Image (tube, rainbow, N blue to C red):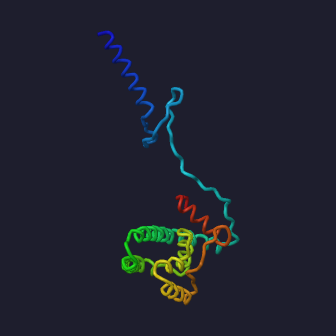
Amino acid sequence: MKRTLILTFILSLMAFATHAQESKITVKGYLVPVCVYEGDTIPNIMLPTVYVYKPLKFKNKKQQEKYNRLVINVKKTLPIAKEVNRAIIETYEYLQTLPDEKARQKHLSMVEKGVKQQYTPRLKKLTFSQGKLLIKLINRETDSSSYELVKAFLGPFKAGFYQAFASIFGASLKKEYHPEDEDALIERVVVLVENGQL
């Protein structure tokens, strides 16, 4: 009886010790994992990355307004560029599963109609500067210019048509994104928006 009681007590302690090492605790309302180090229970919290840039200095109010407009434009167009990237990846992966070229062309026609239905109302609401920014952000997200993407999926004729249409309005589907040079400020805003800092 005494042995059973001692054995039960030891097993309970072992279970408690094991449980303590794998448990979670509540810190300011959040349930977080913990680790036990030399008898101390330490919360294990992953902190998000915080990007720190040199503060911007504006020469005048007009320059600050331009920056504020850029932030608004990035917040409006970046989600669309990310959606386009996901759609391209999904379409490409699905095309690889189709048996022949006829099935691929049929699927691409359906995708083109779906894209027009889904994005035309949203794109009509964009300003000219937001449209040009979207072209750059699509290049940033996909590593391909909008022209190359249209050419790859819809063919050179449609790519040429869309490029000609864009050039009427002073835009170019061939515009590339250069985060180190001319688009450094855009890259800074994009990183801060993606990280939730703006």
Q: At which x and y percent is residue 26?
A: 43, 38
Q: Nearer the viewer, residue 27 or 109?
A: 109
Residue furthest to the top in view is: 2
Q: At which x and y percent is residue 159?
A: 51, 84
Q: At which x and y percent is residue 45?
A: 51, 42
Q: Nearer the viewer, residue 123 or 21?
A: 21
In which image quadrant can residue 21 be found? top left
x 59%, y 65%: residue: 189
Q: Nearer the viewer, residue 53 or 90?
A: 90
In which image quadrant can residue 184 be found? bottom right
Picture quarter with the N terminus = top left
Residue 115 lies left or right of residue 180; in this view the side is left
x 39%, y 68%: residue: 97
Picture quarter with the C terminus = bottom right
Above or below, 164 relative to 149: below
Q: At which x and y percent is residue 42?
A: 51, 34
Residue furthest to the front in view is: 100
x 40%, y 22%: residue: 13
Residue furthest to the right in view is: 59
